[in-house]
Amino acid sequence: MPCQILIVSDNQDLIARCQGIENLEFTYVGAVKDALATLAVPGPYSVVLVDAGLPGIDVSRFFKQVAETSSAVPILTVDEQSVSDTLDMVNQLSIFRLLPQPCDPELLETVFFDATRQFKLINRERKLRKKIQQLSSIDALTGCCTRTVFQERFPVELRRSIRYNHYLSIVFCDIDQLGAINKTHGHRIGDRILTGVAQSALEIFRKDVDWITRWGEDEFLIVLPETPVRGAGIVAERLRQAVDKLAIESKSTSVQATISVGVTGYAPEAPDWNNTLDTLLLVAGNCLKQAQSSGGNRVLVCP
């Protein structure tokens, strides 16, 4: 299947030169909003070429928006007099190639084929990383256990607690409004918040005793062996306060996040209560939802 390339330009000479290239398929849009709408829909575009001379375009802002929604390899074309003035921006935005306008047809074709090869290499690497992450026991971003590890390890931990009449608590936390933070400040800031929360948890909970799982996109599940629910609630509150003090710098803005937490556990004095994985997750999840519905940034303990 021919590679799909999106051309964002109203320059008829550039469009004509693209149309003369074989073995590639082109889509043409003449407005920034149309380009962003096209890229926002999951599709086959491997390359996006943007004409800096397009009326009303903010090139830097446009490419940042493209990076948030698409994996297409970016190319920028400018008039010959602007090439030297544009180099710094091109490097800062990691744009694949800068082309002078008008552009030699052979050079244009070569750059397109180089870009499509780059796209294939990047996608191959992403698929390999995803496969490795799925096979790994450690979440690549946060350093926490994966969900697969939890599902294998926790039933053993729970059976041990029941057998020997030991306490076992779980702390279920969710980062409040992480989706909104990603949308406003970008996923890199969101990732830094995730790692900040994970690091705070790793520092607060007991090393080599408690263990932390990245449960969902913005959720963590912490297992506390030998810990009554009341004690788990105290430690969870320490985590909430630590996250509340986190400040992630984004340009001239400081981005802060909060967490909502639900805490529950197994107690040997009530052996018929919270004695299965499903029950513990259900109770902790309901506690978490109540904490969120109460405004977030709080810990709710449900014995």
Image (spheres, rainbow, N blue to C red):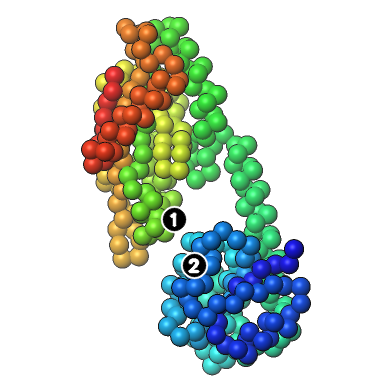
Q: Residue at x 44, y 55 (%)?
A: 187
From this viewpoint, is residue 118 visible? Answer: yes
Q: Where is residue 281 in the image (x, y as percent from the top left)?
A: 41, 25
254 is higher (above) or lower (below) than 178: below
**Label 1 vs label 2: CA separation?**
19 Å
Location of mark 2 (residue): 37
Viewer-proximal residue, 32 or 84?
32
Q: Are marks 1 and 2 in contact (CB under 8 Å)?
A: no
From this viewpoint, is residue 92 visible? Answer: no
- The single residue placed furthest to the bottom in the displayed view is 81
Which picture quadrant has residue 283?
top left
Q: Which quadrant does the N terminus fall into?
A: bottom right
Q: Where is residue 159 in the image (x, y as percent from the top left)?
A: 48, 12
Q: Which residue is drawn at 37% across and 49% down?
A: 178
Q: Position of residue 8 (x, y in %)?
A: 55, 78
Viewer-proximal residue, 96 or 182?
182
Q: Which quadrant does the C terminus fall into?
A: top left
Viewer-proximal residue, 290 or 205?
290
> Around disc 1, counting alpha carbons within 10 Å, would you say few (fewer than 14), some (14 to 19), or many (20 or more)?
some
90 is higher (above) or lower (below) than 155: below
> Around disc 2, counting alpha carbons within 10 Å, would you say few (fewer than 14), some (14 to 19), or many (20 or more)?
few
Q: Please state if 184 lies on the left or on the right of 120 as rendered.
A: left
Q: Which amino acid does label 1 sit on?
A: His
Q: Residue 187 carries which label?
A: 1
Q: Where is residue 141 in the image (x, y as percent from the top left)?
A: 50, 45
- The single residue placed furthest to the right in the displayed view is 22
Q: Identify the element where label 1 is drawn.
A: helix
